[in-house]
Image (cartoon, rainbow, N blue to C red):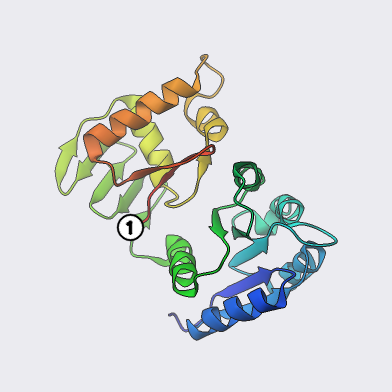
Amino acid sequence: MSAVKQKILIVDDEPDILELIEYNLKKEGYQVFLANNGQEGITIAKKVHPDLIILDIMMPKMDGIEACRLMRAIPEFKNTFMVFLTARSEEYSEIAGFNVGADDYIAKPIKPRALVSRINAILRRNSSGDEVSDNKVEIGDLVIDREAYLVYQAGKKVILAKKEFELLYLLASKPGKVYTRESILKNIWEDSVVVTNRTIDVHIRKLREKLGETYVATVKGVGYKFELS
């Protein structure tokens, strides 16, 4: 842990859940703040400016989906990590969360060690030794050079087609972040051509063939992400 404690805001209407997560995150060295619903969460977030916000989906007064949507519209929270915490396993709730700007999704019942590990991994995106600059990504054994359109894996050059490269660079620039199919289409293909979901799937398959299965993960019904090791 660094000398300056990273701040985490937990927004949940269940006292037992708040207490459990607060205890484990404080033990890990984080500064923790609590809120009981979405409205209170937004108010506290504006005061303390957390590095990461954990939001339950089903809450009184204002649910987590709406709270996330409203906070993402506020410039100061544009890059704040937001993680949904919910007992609901329905696929549509995950999709709704990612569509309003969630970075990750953790299901109840809470497993403290797994939750802490996930939170640590998310926050390492900004503080780890992995380098992400405007033109180069160095993460694990991969080096992705945007200027030269070159990829090296464990020092060995990997030949990628232009769109394969751009897709890999997009995903690897924010490890762990889930990109919806709509977001991938907008970022890689823009509006210049008609592209279907099948096109994205083919490019993902080619990346896996060339780099192995460990880097690009599928989030069922949502999209893809660069897997954190």
Q: Could you tell me residue 174's position as x and y percent?
A: 45, 50
Q: Which residue is mark 1?
A: 229
Q: Is residue 52 above or below residue 32?
A: above
Q: Position of residue 196 (x, y in %)?
A: 50, 19
Residue 36 appears in the rendering = yes
Q: Quadrant of the C terminus?
A: bottom left
Asked which quadrant contains residue 217, the reply is top left
- Residue located at (27% from left, 55% from top): 140
**In this view of the protein, which residue sits in the foreground, 18 or 102?**
18
Q: Is residue 219 left or right of residue 136?
A: right
The spot of residue 44 in percent (x, y) is 75, 72
Image quadrant in which the N terminus is located: bottom left
The residue at 25%/36% (across/down) is 150
Identify which residue, 17 or 196, lies in the foreground. 17
Query: Residue at the left extreme?
Result: 156
Q: Is residue 190 above or below residue 135?
A: above
Residue 186 horizontal side relative to residue 19, left or right = left
Most distant residue in the top direction: 194
Residue 17 screen position, x and y as percent: 64, 74
Residue for point 29% across, 25% down = 161
Above or below residue 11? Residue 89 is above
Q: Residue furthest right?
A: 61
Quadrant of the rendered image containing residue 206: top left
In the shown orientation, is residue 105 left or right of residue 78?
left
Q: Using the image, determine if residue 120 lies above or below residue 227.
A: below
Within the image, what quadrant is residue 114 found in?
A: bottom left
Question: Is label 1 in a helix, a strand or a loop?
Answer: loop
- Counting every numbered tag in the picture gives 1
Please indicate, yes or no, whether residue 149 appears anywhere in the rendered image: no
The crowd level at tag 1 (other Cα within 10 Å; few <14, some 14-19, many 20+) is few
Q: Amino acid under label 1?
A: Ser
